[in-house]
Amino acid sequence: MRIPGRTERRVVAAILVTALIPLVASIVVARTVIARVSATAFQPEFGVHLDRALGVYAELAAAIKQGMRSEAEAIAAADPLRRSAFAGDAELLGAELARIIAAHPALVSLRVERCGGELAAARERGRPVDPAHEKTLTVRKAIQRASGHPGSPAEPAPEDGDCDGDARTLVATFAAPSARFDELESAQAFAQAYRALEREHRKEYLDESYGDAFAALLGATIVLAVLAGVLVARPVVDRIARLAAATRPVAEGDLSVRVALQGNDEVADLGRAFDRMLEELEGSRARIEFLKRMGEWQKMARHLAHEIKNPLTPIQLAVEECHRRYAGSDPAYQRLLQTTLEVVEEEVGTLRRLVGEFSNFARLPQAELEPSDLAEFLREQGERFAAVEEAGREHASDEALLGRIDLEFDVPAAPMPAALDREMLRRALGNIVRNAAQALRDAQRAAPGGGAAERPGALWGTVRVSARSEGQSHLIAIDDDGPGIDPAVRDSVFDPYVTTRYDGTGLGLSIVKKIIVDHGGTIDVLESPLGGARFVIRLPRAGTPAARAAQRAEGDVGPRSTSRAAGGPGGPATLGRDVLFEEDREASAGGAGPARPAARGDGGA
């Protein structure tokens, strides 16, 4: 049984308060009314006139019934029916019955029966009897043979069923409006009640003072009911009106409206549920739009990779062939060929790296979510990064980006259950950390005395990864003390091909957002307390509606691509454990140029 809510209890209490007081007073007044009315209201003349009225109603009912019997008798005595009833032609008899029904509006049905109740023919008026508005009367009349018809006249069938084998009986069912009969029954019931009260008229009649008191009591009840209703219902109605007003812009597509109802009753709960629903719808719509854009961008990346990759090998082979075939002794021309070969090889290497990045982006697989512990996952990543840092401090090249930063992990000891694709999330975290390291490196190189940044063991800055649980979500924050990201580009920093680095492709942060969205989460870029950029990843807790929705969306995608483990140049196999440093190796091999100190907004992986 449902427990009444606060609003329901308030309304019930108001109704009880406003109804009990006049109810008790009405009982007292009514007893006095009955006592005085019963002594003076029952006059002998009332009973006489009531009996006469009942007599009129009874005679009217009897007349109606007698008229139906007479009508049935006249129908049975009509020669056409008498001839057709004994003619032995059922079709002729049916036609005669139909004609009679059409001529007598009160008839519901006509039947002609032979001896023993055998049906010879029957017809009905075409619509059923309405019990709510009609009463029926069935009359049975014997049909005599028509004069001149061979044979002797048929006699009425006796009640016990013994009859002449050639007898015919007319069974006529009439319908009459039930209003008069209902009025008769009502009048009879009223008369009986009146007589019962008349026998007990020992009460006094109500005088004017009691009538005035009852009227005043009734007025007070109305006023109290109106006041109580206004006081109780107005706050509820006002908040429901706010909810109704908020639905209009939502119907037009604006999901940013919020009602923010205050209170602790069911209406306030409804308002908060309405706001949560709009937040979820807004997030779902943004997710769907982002995934649609990602699909289009991936198509373009696939096309670009195909168009760029095809001419690279012929270009490189042609230049190498020119360099190899030249047998002259001109030193200037030899230097020119050598320089050309080096430039072409360097640029072809850069283009091959871009082709690999485009291919990875175009074939980015769907996340395969499994129950996991986010805190344990982050601790494992902290240990991996720490090992890389230790090994990288001995080198000054770009191959050791993570060895040149102070990387800190702040992860709670308590479990953080979530549905994760550990491999994909590792890639996302690695991309953000590596972007932070690149931004710190570029800022150090661009600073006065930037050559000190190239010294072995010199640190470029600090990157901090922290995690905590908040409501139905887990939050991961990646902070750095680099140049940060310009607020003007924060809204578009996750779009593909948006970058502020001279050597960036603008794909890394798009891949990161795609991975986070596949997890049912969100990612935002803010200003860090350390002075640089802060990336905030919000992932749903395991078992929450957002987590279940992400897992359902994963299931709707269909079978996963097996290319993740298949390997192959530029394919999704690069999503494995060495993905953190893949592009650093390629950049080193391709010959990275001098970095710019631009504000970080690179989408490059």
Image (cartoon, rainbow, N blue to C red):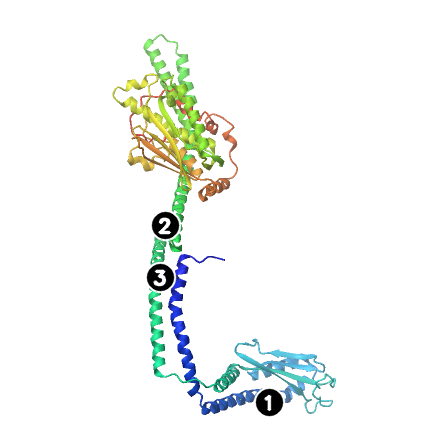
**Tag 3 residue:** 232
Mark 3 secondary-structure assignment:
helix
Would residue 26 be visible to someone looking at this image?
yes
From the viewer's side, name the closer residue of 100 and 259: 259
Q: Nearer the viewer, residue 40 or 409?
A: 40
Q: Position of residue 430 (x, y in %)?
A: 41, 28
Residue in view at x 68 percent, y 90 percent: 146
Q: Which residue is mark 2?
A: 253
| Relative horizontal placement of residue 336, taking residue 578 as reference (left or right) | left
Give the mark nearest the N terminus, 3 or 1: 1
Disc 2 from disc 3: Cα separation: 34 Å
The answer to whether 543 is drawn above or below residue 586 in the figure is below
Residue 146, disc: none
- Percent from the top left, x then y, of residue 510? 39, 34
Q: Residues within 10 Å of mark 3 (few under 14, many from 20)?
A: some
Disc number at residue 70? 1
